[in-house]
């Protein structure tokens, strides 16, 4: 059983290249997989590994960057390693929005725990915004939520500028970090009633019982688990090898679905040359399965 740990922290980071090289070696030596993004404004990542190895890594991150607590973090378990390898990346921002923020700009009074969140979004006057990408929204979201249909988070401010300032705004995303930047942006624009789901969807699904939940569907995650349900249990979605989009059991019943090749989302967009190449790849995967060998697209890549 592996522990999966997602986190972010707004903290001043110096010597980016030096820290990247150190972290990369540290993750490898401690059998940790996943991605950590570092920027001058902080850290953002999701990693997986043995329980003791993850605990050792989180302690190292805190000591290395001189902080006591993450701004937000979530834990879950997985029977298989949800990542193939460790990656440490240097970025201009830990979430791209052309807006740098620091911990002092965060107003914790507007961070609502799941039960308080339920009360807020039951209010019909509340504008509920799903700040994630459209394909994530389709996998699952909160009742009455609106998705801006923005594929690049840098374009998100264009949508925000259209909102009315006199209505309460409730925002949410997978782990909370995208809302951190959005809330600061809106406050700078004169909005006062801005709220966000503390810890994001993952915290909500982990703490709220299914019979009390206002969530519908599953939550897409950017790893080989693909989606999670209440209690952060493994969801039912798979990943299309043709377009790398999540696919449901309904999608698999479509005539346009072919394992390892295409799904309803990409069938009409792929060329015959691409489909032929994907079929060849899938045949190699079948052969690897039969012989008991590893292959890069298997979930249980140990």
Image: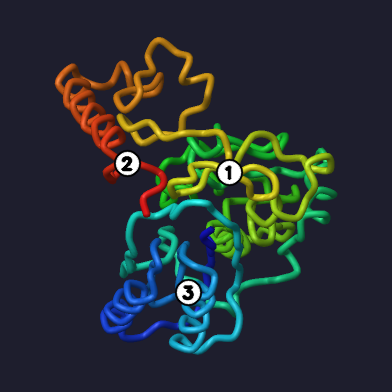
| Image height of 43 relative to 148, above or below | below
Residue receiving disc 1: 234
Disc 1, SS: loop
User: Mark 3 and mark 2 in contact (Cβ < 8 Å)?
Assistant: no
Residue at numbered disc 3: 53
Q: Of callouts 2 and 1, which one flags the residue occurring earlier in the amino acid sequence? A: 1
Distance between the Cα atoms at labels 2 and 1?
18 Å
Which x, y percent locates residue 167? 75, 47
- Give the image quarter of residue 110: bottom right
- The answer to whether residue 220 is above or below residue 12 is above
Q: Secondary structure at mark 2?
A: loop
**Tag 3 and tag 1, C-beta contact below 8 Å:** no
Q: Position of residue 158 (x, y in %)?
A: 48, 46
Residue 104, x across and y down, in percent? 60, 80
When the figure is inspected, residue 207 is found, relative to residue 128, above or below; the finding is below
Q: Quadrant of residue 193?
A: bottom right
Coordinates of residue 2 in the picture (x, y in percent): 51, 60
Question: On residue 297, which mark appears?
Answer: 2
């Amino acid at each position: 059983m592996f522990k999966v740990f997602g986190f972010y922290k707004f903290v001043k980071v110096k010597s980016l290249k030096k820290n990247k090289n150190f972290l990369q070696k540290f993750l490898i030596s401690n059998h940790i997989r996943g991605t950590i993004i570092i920027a001058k404004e902080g850290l953002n990542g999701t990693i997986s590994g043995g329980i003791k190895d993850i605990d050792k890594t989180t302690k190292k991150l805190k000591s290395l960057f001189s902080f006591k607590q993450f701004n937000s973090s979530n834990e879950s378990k997985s029977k298989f390693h949800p990542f193939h390898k460790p990656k440490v990346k240097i970025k201009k921002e830990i979430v791209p929005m052309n807006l740098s923020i620091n911990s002092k700009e965060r107003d914790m009074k507007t961070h609502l725990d799941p039960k308080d969140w339920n009360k807020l979004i039951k209010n019909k006057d509340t504008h509920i915004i799903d700040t994630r990408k459209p394909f994530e929204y389709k996998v699952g979201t909160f009742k009455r939520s609106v998705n801006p249909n923005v594929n690049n988070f840098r374009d998100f401010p264009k949508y925000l500028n259209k909102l009315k300032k006199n209505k309460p705004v409730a925002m949410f995303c997978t782990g909370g970090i995208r809302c951190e930047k959005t809330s600061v942006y809106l406050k700078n624009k004169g909005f006062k009633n801005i709220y966000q789901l503390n810890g994001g969807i993952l915290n909500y699904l982990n703490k709220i019982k299914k019979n009390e939940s206002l969530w519908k569907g599953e939550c897409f995650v950017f790893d080989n688990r693909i989606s999670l349900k209440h209690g952060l249990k493994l969801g039912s979605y798979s990943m299309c090898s043709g377009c790398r989009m999540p696919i449901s059991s309904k999608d698999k019943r479509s005539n346009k679905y072919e394992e390892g090749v295409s799904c309803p989302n990409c069938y009409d967009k792929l060329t015959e040359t691409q489909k032929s190449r994907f079929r060849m790849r899938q045949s190699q995967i079948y052969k690897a399965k039969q012989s008991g060998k590893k292959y890069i697209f298997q979930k249980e890549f140990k």
